[in-house]
Amino acid sequence: MSVALQESRSARFAMRCANWAERWFPDSWVFATVAVLIAAVAALAIGAPVSATAKAFGDGFWSLIPFTMQMAFVVIGGYVVASSRPASKLIDRFAQVPKNGRSAVAWVAIISMLASLLNWGLSLVFGGLLAKALARRTDLKMDYRAAGAAAYLGLGAVWALGLSSSAAQLQANPASLPPSILAITGVIPFTETIFLWQSGVMLLVLVIISVIIAYVTAPSADSAKDAQACGIDPVVETPETAKPARPGEWLEYSPFLIIMLVLLGGGWLWQEFASKPAIVAISGLNTYNLLFLMAGALLHWRPRSFLDAVARAVPTTTGVLIQFPLYGSIAAIMTTVQGSGGDTIAHYISHFFVQIASHDTYAVLMGVYSAILGFFIPSGGGKWIIEAPYVMQVANELQFHLGWAVQIYNAAEALPNLINPFYMLPLLGVLGLKARDLIGFTFVQLLVHIPVVLILLWALGSTLSYFPPIQP
């Protein structure tokens, strides 16, 4: 059955799509730039002055700098924790659990998705290293490509329903939101987004379905393609502990600075959690990032090891650093530039959706829209800045639960990740594979996830009532 699924028409079609995308799709920065130009042309088309459009571009460009740095640290913190020696030892222990190749693939899927609920950067690195550790076991007969695809399920299926959800974090942190969006949405705490019981139900269903698909689509032992067959050496070389080359470097190799730093950070974290409910404290991006950075520093123990891990993590944040300012410009043009009639682009878009949507169809309509847009603008937080002005305005006008509107975005936004190579890059670097090696498996996940997610969004959303925006 698994071989048939793997070689099915849909899987072969996915491979062709992946090859086409790798050849013809430009860098995602190009998509972001094109989106800026489209927003600018749209502003001019509704009668906005050129000067006002240009001013909005410049003003918006720097409006997301705090959030941009916060998202970069989400990636860095997750990478630093996952690449530490204690994490490597934990991965080796996890690699001893499965008894056969198929169960090993399912096990990678489980660990990857659970890790993504804490930090999506952690999920990619930890899941990739676990797949490699399992590949070193010659008794499993595990398909390395299927295990790599399973390692990607954290980001491709459920990450946006966890603590590192960009949209949920933005809405819970008013200081990170542009004022124009905050005026529409207000502050939405985690209790009304990722900690809703409806979110828990959706998360559980998606995890179970994803694990089942990962198991049944994994090739059997007779047809499994292991790491060596993929041209990959699964052995991970752990750098030896170096020694200072000169007297001025001794502090870099001593745990003293790390211990003092962690004690200071721990004192601040203790005050945060002691003075606030735990849910409120962890919903702060600064608290969340400091927690991961201090944990990563402690796990690496010596400054030199910690700094080397950060240096390896920084290149994976390039997309965030260079694209998020463009998303800020798009949001500013859409929400602040008025046309000849006194209305903004966001007003026209929200009016259009109000005309075609109702309270009952909002979840499905917005879910489909967010999923399609997510393939061209692969950025959870950046894309939310673009969508939020009109998506949330429609929710207000239709009296739809604002927190669930965020969750609609979160669940739908993750769908295109399953076949979009953009977010795969850090994982592919760990695995040594190409996107086309994984997409044949993740495309099958996408085919099942689309109807399941849309049905869950509609059904669970119908159990919630509207509440007005909470202004800080």
Image (cartoon, rainbow, N blue to C red):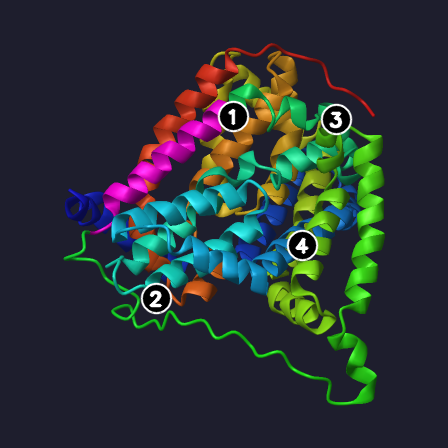
The disc label shown at residue 200, or none: 1
Between the C-alphas of marks 1 and 4, the distance is 27 Å
Establish if 235 lies above or below 59.
Answer: below
Regarding residue 450, the answer to whether it shows in the image is yes
Marks 2, 4: nearer the viewer: 2
- Could you tell me what secondary structure mostly forms the magenta stretch? helix
Question: Which disc number belongs to residue 136?
Answer: 2
Q: Mark 1, residues whose alpha carbon is within 10 Å: few (<14), some, or many (≥20)?
A: some
Which tag, 2 or 3, sits closer to the chain's start? 2
Alpha-carbon distance for marks 2 and 1? 35 Å
Q: Element under label 1? A: helix
Looking at the image, tell me whether mark 1 or mark 3 is earlier in sequence order. 3
Residue 209: % across, % down: 35, 33
- Whole-angstrom CA distance, mark 2 to mark 3, is 48 Å
Mark 2 residue element: loop
The vertical placement of 157 against 295, above or below, is above
Q: Which residue in the protein does label 3 denote?
A: 187
Q: Residues within 10 Å of mark 4 (few under 14, many from 20)?
A: many
Magenta segment: 200-219
Q: Where, by quadrant of the figure, is residue 389 drawn?
A: top right
Q: CA distance from mark 1 to mark 3?
A: 21 Å
Instruction: Work out whether mark 4 precedes mark 3 in sequence or the reverse, and give the earlier one.
Output: 4
